[in-house]
């Protein structure tokens, strides 16, 4: 069994208002760039999240049969995901280093944003073969492609966590799964499959699948 997952993402934080300058989208091979802007005690950012992913599973098994040859099960499944979403709420960053009412750094309360709107798409390919060791009439091949998408105006489940370290005076940004909504709508089996193949799942293309 072989599994592979690839991911390319960009999270952009754009300060609202004319006084602050936009930050360049983050990529895994390009560092952040900074353009200085006039100081503001409280800043509100518009957050967008764009990316693509691929998940593939190659599965081979030969489950035994009492009194006969083993079965042979093979699966070569993969899925793709793309997303381009904007978050409904602004990310608010207060003046860091300034104590709040509890005498803590005001930026310790920054949590990030959740809930977005945007275009997402997921596709899945199923390619399964079952060779029965006992009954040839049970041999089966199941193959299909499935897909779903959300329109740019559709609300989707997504989130970006932001945590602050008072020791380093820096924020850590963690983007959560942006394709939960569209994966929930994606068919998990071929439309004309009927009963599941003996001892094999309907699909192995779900991202994050693990034996």
Image (tube, grey):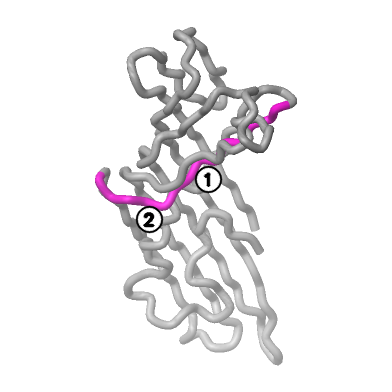
Front position in the image: 78 or 154: 154
Front position in the image: 171 or 28: 171
Q: Taking the image as drawn, is residue 84 in sight?
A: no
For mark 2, does the 10 Å Cα neighbourhood hold few (<14), some (14 to 19), or many (20 or more) residues?
A: many
Residue at 41% in and 14% down: 21
Residue at 63% in and 35% down: 108
Q: Quadrant of the C terminus?
A: bottom right
- From the viewer's perspective, tell me whether residue 117 is left or right of residue 94: left
Q: Taking the image as drawn, is residue 122 in sight?
A: yes
Q: Which residue is mark 1?
A: 176
Residue 18: percent from the left, percent from the top? 33, 15
The region drawn magenta spans 153-166
Q: Quadrant of the N terminus?
A: bottom right
- From the viewer's perspective, tell me whether residue 113 is left or right of residue 1: left
Q: Nearer the viewer, mark 2 or mark 1?
A: 1
Residue 194's place in the image compared with 42, above or below, is below
Residue at far bottom of view: 67
Question: Where on the picture, by quarter, is residue 166?
Answer: top right
Residue 178 is inside the magenta segment: no
For mark 1, does the 10 Å Cα neighbourhood hold few (<14), some (14 to 19), or many (20 or more) residues?
A: some
Q: Secondary structure at mark 2?
A: helix
Q: Principal SS element in the magenta part? A: strand
What mark, if any, has residue 182 been given in the picture? 2
Residue 180's place in the image compared with 12, above or below, is below
């Amino acid at each position: 069994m072989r599994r592979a997952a690839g991911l390319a993402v960009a999270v952009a934080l754009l300060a609202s208002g004319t006084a602050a300058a936009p930050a360049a989208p983050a990529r895994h091979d390009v560092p952040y760039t900074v353009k200085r802007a006039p100081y503001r005690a409280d800043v509100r950012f518009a957050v967008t999240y764009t990316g693509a992913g691929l998940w593939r599973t190659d599965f081979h098994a030969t489950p035994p049969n009492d009194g006969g040859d083993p079965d042979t099960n093979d699966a070569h499944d993969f899925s793709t995901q793309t997303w381009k979403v904007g978050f409904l709420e602004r990310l608010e960053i207060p003046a860091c280093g300034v104590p709040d009412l509890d005498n803590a750094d005001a930026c310790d309360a920054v949590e990030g944003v959740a809930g977005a709107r945007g275009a997402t798409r997921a596709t899945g390919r199923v390619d399964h073969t079952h060779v029965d060791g006992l009954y040839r009439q049970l041999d089966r091949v199941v193959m299909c492609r499935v897909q779903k998408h959300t329109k740019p105006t559709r609300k989707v489940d997504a989130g970006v966590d932001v945590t602050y370290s008072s020791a380093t005076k820096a924020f850590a940004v963690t983007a959560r799964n942006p394709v939960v909504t569209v994966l929930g709508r994606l068919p998990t089996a071929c439309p004309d499959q009927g009963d599941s193949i003996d001892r094999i799942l309907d699909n192995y293309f779900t991202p994050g699948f693990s034996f």
